[in-house]
Amino acid sequence: MGALKALVVGMGVLIVAGTVVLVVLLIQRSGGPARGPADVTANLPAGNRIMGIAGVENRLAIWLEGPEGSRVLLLDAQGRQMGELRAR
């Protein structure tokens, strides 16, 4: 009878420990708090107008019209230019 009590107590401890591990893993994998809006500054050539802006994955796409034609700039979260698409 004593062995049965020890087995039941041992299994109860394993259930509690497993539940604690699951809760800790869920909290870690849920990620941190969401970031607020970022301030991004882009240096646009003179004479260009912004015609549209769209979020693309973790980048910002800016549609520009200017003296050299239409183009789309791709900027990262820090405002660095990651690419450019030009219309012909």
Image (spheres, grey):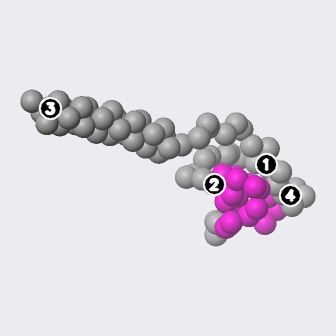
- Is there any visible trace of residue 46 in the rendered image? yes
Q: Are marks 3 and 1 in contact (CB under 8 Å)?
A: no
**Kind of residue indicated by mark 1:** Val
- For this orientation, the residue located farthest to the front is 2
Q: Give the residues in magenta.
A: 59-84
Mark 3 surroundings within 10 Å by alpha-carbon count, few (fewer than 14), some (14 through 19), many (20 or more) = few
- Mark 1 — residue? 40
Circle 3: element type: helix
Marking on residue 59: 2
Q: Secondary structure at mark 1?
A: loop
Pick the quarter of the image with the N terminus. top left
Q: Which residue is mark 3?
A: 2
| Amino acid type, callout 3 | Gly
Quarter location, residue 36? top right
Which residue is depicted at the point 47% across and 45% down? 29
Measured in 3D between alpha carbons, the distance from the residue under mark 3 to the one under mark 1, in whole angstroms, is 69 Å
Residue behind mark 4: 43
Cα separation, mark 4 vs mark 3, equals: 78 Å
Q: Nearer the viewer, mark 4 or mark 1?
A: 1
Left or right of 48 on screen, residue 4: left
What quarter of the picture does the C terminus occupy? bottom right
Q: Residues within 10 Å of mark 1 (few under 14, many from 20)?
A: few
Q: Which numbered disc flags the more N-terminal residue, 3 or 2?
A: 3
Under circle 4, the secondary element is: loop
